[in-house]
Amino acid sequence: MEIRLENIRKTFGGKTVISDLSMIISSGSFTTLLGPSGCGKTTLLRMIAGLETPDSGTITLGGNCVFSSEKRVNTPPEKRGLGFVFQDFALWPHMKVRDNVAFGLKAQKKTGNIEKKVREALHAVQLDDYGDRYPSELSGGQQQRVSFARAIVTEPECILFDEPLSALDALLREEMRSELRSLVTERGITSVFVTHDQTEAMSMSDMIAVMSGGQIEQYASPEEIYTKPATKFAARFVGTSDWIDQNSMFRPENASLEKTSDNDEKFMAKVTGSEFLGSTYRILLSYGGEKWVIETSRKVETGTDIPIYVKQNSILSIRN
């Protein structure tokens, strides 16, 4: 399902939350809306779902217009054919797992082979033996798997994810990233994923829309955003950036303590700290009022001035 947003605008109480935003999400892709709290990413997701109504613009799902301020079209959420996975799992506590998963099928009156569909959905999320349990008898990770099963059992063309991993601990989040990505990719489901966690966005996405102040700073692949950030906000928000001046920066992996070629540029920086990470040291530096971070194979004494060599072709000029 291709998703087209054209000139979407949304205000709350006179404050603009989304400002004249347009983007195309390709069918079958995993696209992340990434940005800090208050940037408008969840509001945008809810407008795609039909849970919020834009002030103006057009939303098209799979070639069908589901919202148009000009044509006065506003298809209700239950008729948009979308799955939705919430941050807080949103499971019915009085229903067993199998009934929670079957709920969407019953609501859509898709009751044919319902038991088989529920079994297949639970198998897909590795919960074959948990159908007769209640949500309170499950761990947080298991509850989130139930919410995934409930989303895929109706066989939607698109699933919207509103920070679904944020309530899980760090190790479980990492495990669930790959499981979630595999789950939707194998089924060819278009996925729109909201998060403020850049690691989630970079590791899971085909495309990322970096958002700030209700606008898209950059919409590109993770690799392009990291290596060719379009704006200063994108450069600072995604990955670690070491700034030489207001318009020039480099990524830490492109710097070293030793000169590696005649094209290296030399900078003298002061060591402000050193952190042992096991296989490497994380060196904290100060240069011209800016804070730098690089990783090295050896420890450096705090308070010393040391040369930092940066590949000239890795220094990026960003003026937006």
Image (cartoon, grey):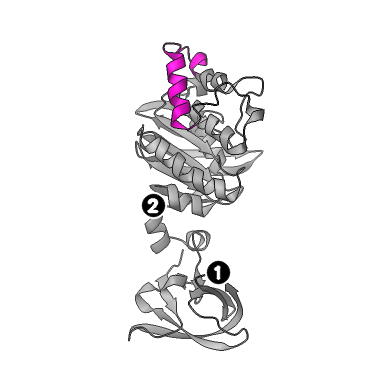
In terms of image quadrants, where is residue 71? top left
**SS at badge 1:** loop
Q: Which residue is mark 2?
A: 220
- State whether residue 110 is above or below residue 47: above
Furthest-left residue in this view: 262
Quadrant, the N terminus = top left
Looking at the image, can residue 154 be seen? no
| Residue in the picture at 60% in, 20% down | 96
Residue 302, position as x, y percentages in the image: 62, 83
Q: Position of residue 205 (x, y in %)?
A: 42, 47
Q: Are marks 1 and 2 in contact (CB under 8 Å)?
A: no
Q: Residue at x 43, y 71 (%)?
A: 253
In percent of width and height, residue 194 lies at 52, 43
Most foreground residue, 95 or 221: 95
- Depth check: 154 or 245 in front? 154
Magenta span = 105-126
User: How far apart are labels 1 and 2 at the CA level?
Assistant: 31 Å
Hey, what amino acid is under mark 2? Answer: Ala
Q: Is 277 left, or right, of 255 in this rendering?
A: right
Membership of 270 in magenta stretch: no
Sequence-first disc among 1 and 2? 2
* Residue 184 % position (x, y): 41, 36
Judging by the rendered image, the residue that carries numbered circle 1 is 277
Q: Residue at x 51, y 18 (%)?
A: 102
Vertical placement of residue 169 versus 68, above or below: below
